[in-house]
């Protein structure tokens, strides 16, 4: 068959669709979801418009927690599956697994853990225990991150790393395992989901009001430093809201989740899991299941995700003799970032021999220019860079220097705001670079 890659234009945020072939069958990968909007989910519409023949997404990947990548997933699955379509699996950031199964079985318990974890982080911070040394910045000041002891989270995850995903168990068992519940619990939860749906929403709504009023009281009455922790607590709660929606959709539509953890990769430097020879993680370790009974500290630290862009998951659709390769970068720089900024991720030992598509990291932002160096060293020939979800006033630097590039959403292309679908099909086993529709930013080639 042939492959087709589509950058889906959304009102805000980023999403990509890859239609390809796995073992002789059509296989559809969705990467990221754009932002959340009330009403009809724009991603559902964008997929229907771009690929009306598709009724199944085999793997829906969320690269990281940023709202412009993750929040569209809050309503996507319910609307997409509600229209009679299916999703095979969710592939999600491993840190989110700490919220399971409590996000389904005991949402108040989860909210309480976030709050307790925040309070204990605050107490540790006040005595200076949480300051992880991160070296010095350009002016010689010591850089610290008060919430950096994420090694606690990594340690809690360590025993759940699996080198290879178990393929032999039934879909229903995979669903239960991925949610962290027993088969009996799964049927109970499923039986009551319609009644508990609004209760779950209420828990998070009430928690948000209470976290916000706590933040307000701290703003006026407490030392300035407390604000950071309370803001992180609100962030953690926001992540919990995403998880709650995705968890309920997974339950409602029977979509097993696979967890990919950056922290374990950071400590082992060996990615694992995914689909062998087909869809490979570059900077994560697949977990066998959510960690059992994580502490409040671990729940809070994992969900507050203080280093989210660094942790963005990267996946490679491996090039083979029949289909060309694709590298999905999310917001990654392809290096270890804060912990060890000069160290690059090791790219797969077998590098592609034909042109690949690579999504422009972090919407082409110059902050992530390093990714081009890593890719251009690894891949032969100049990759086709596709950019989506551009922000206002973004500085694009190296992106403009790439020989082959297209923007789906851009404020510079053709001298005006452009929003268009970018579609690249394959001919034989190679990507076929489409003729230009309007001028690319800022020079033509
Ligand atoms: Zn982003
Ligand atoms: Zn552009």
Image (cartoon, helix red, strand yellow):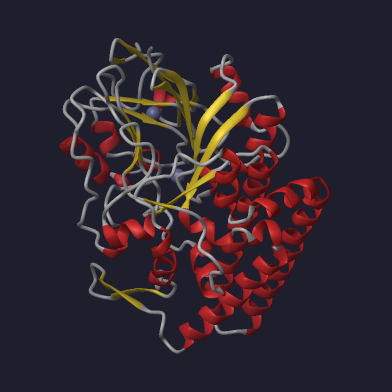
- 53 w.r.t. 33: above or below: above
- Nearer to the camera, 128 or 181: 181
- Nearer to the camera, 235 or 350: 350
- Nearer to the camera, 110 or 211: 110
Q: Residue at 28% across / 32% down in the picture? A: 400
Query: Which image quadrant: the C terminus?
Result: top left
- Does 82 sit left or right of 284 as displayed? right
x%, y% of residue 203? 75, 61
- How many labels sit on residues? 0
- Nearer to the camera, 64 or 61: 61
Q: For residue 201, which quarter of the picture?
A: bottom right
- Does 239 sit left or right of 410 as displayed? right
Q: For residue 50, which quarter of the picture?
A: top right
Q: Residue at 65% across / 30% down in the picture? A: 80
Q: Residue furthest right?
A: 195
> Looking at the image, in which quadrant does ligand 1 appear?
top left
- Res 74 seen here: yes
- Res 359 seen here: no
Query: Which image quadrant: the N terminus?
Result: top left
Q: Residue furthest bottom?
A: 127
x%, y% of residue 438? 40, 15
- Does 134 sit left or right of 331 as displayed? left
Q: Residue at 68% across / 75% down in the picture? A: 214
x%, y% of residue 312? 40, 49
x%, y% of residue 362? 39, 43
């Amino acid at each position: 068959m042939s492959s087709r890659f589509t950058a889906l234009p959304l009102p805000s945020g980023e999403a990509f669709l890859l239609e390809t072939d796995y073992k002789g069958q059509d296989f559809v990968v969705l990467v990221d979801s754009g932002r959340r909007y009330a009403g009809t989910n724009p991603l559902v519409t964008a997929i229907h418009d771009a690929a009306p023949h598709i009724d199944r997404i085999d793997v829906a990947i969320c690269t990281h927690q940023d709202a412009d990548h993750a929040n569209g997933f809050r309503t996507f699955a319910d609307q997409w599956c509600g229209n009679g379509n299916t999703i095979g699996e969710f592939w999600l950031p491993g840190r989110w697994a700490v919220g399971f199964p409590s996000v389904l079985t005991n949402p108040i318990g989860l909210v309480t853990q976030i709050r307790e974890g925040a309070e204990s982080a605050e107490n540790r911070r006040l005595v200076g225990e949480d300051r992880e040394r991160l070296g010095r910045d350009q002016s010689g000041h010591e850089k610290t991150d008060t919430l950096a002891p994420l090694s606690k989270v990594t340690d809690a995850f360590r025993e759940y790393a699996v080198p290879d995903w178990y393929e032999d168990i039934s879909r229903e068992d995979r669903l239960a395992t991925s949610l962290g519940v027993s088969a009996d619990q799964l049927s109970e939860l499923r039986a009551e989901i319609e009644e508990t749906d609004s209760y779950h929403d209420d828990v998070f709504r009430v928690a948000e009001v209470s976290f916000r009023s706590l933040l307000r009281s701290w703003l006026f009455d407490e030392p300035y430093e407390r604000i950071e922790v309370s803001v992180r607590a609100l962030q953690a709660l926001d992540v919990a809201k995403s998880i709650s929606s995705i968890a309920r959709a997974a339950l409602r539509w029977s979509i097993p989740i696979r967890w990919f953890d950056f922290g374990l990769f950071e400590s082992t430097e060996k990615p694992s899991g995914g689909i062998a020879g087909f869809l490979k993680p570059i900077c994560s370790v697949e977990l066998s299941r959510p960690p059992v009974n994580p502490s409040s500290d671990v729940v809070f630290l994992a969900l507050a995700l203080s280093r989210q862009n660094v942790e963005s998951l990267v996946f490679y659709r491996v090039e083979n003799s029949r289909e060309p390769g694709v590298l999905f970068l999310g917001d990654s720089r392809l290096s270890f970032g804060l912990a060890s900024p000069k160290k690059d991720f090791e790219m797969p030992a077998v590098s592609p021999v034909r042109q690949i598509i690579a999504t422009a990291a972090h919407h082409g932002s110059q902050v992530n220019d390093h990714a081009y160096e890593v890719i251009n060293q690894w891949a032969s020939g100049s990759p086709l860079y596709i950019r989506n979800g551009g922000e206002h006033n973004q500085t694009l630097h190296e992106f403009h220097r790439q020989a082959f590039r297209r923007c789906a959403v851009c404020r510079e292309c053709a001298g005006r705001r452009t929003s268009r679908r970018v579609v690249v099909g394959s001919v034989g086993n190679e990507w076929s670079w489409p003729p230009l529709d309007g001028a690319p930013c800022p020079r033509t080639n």
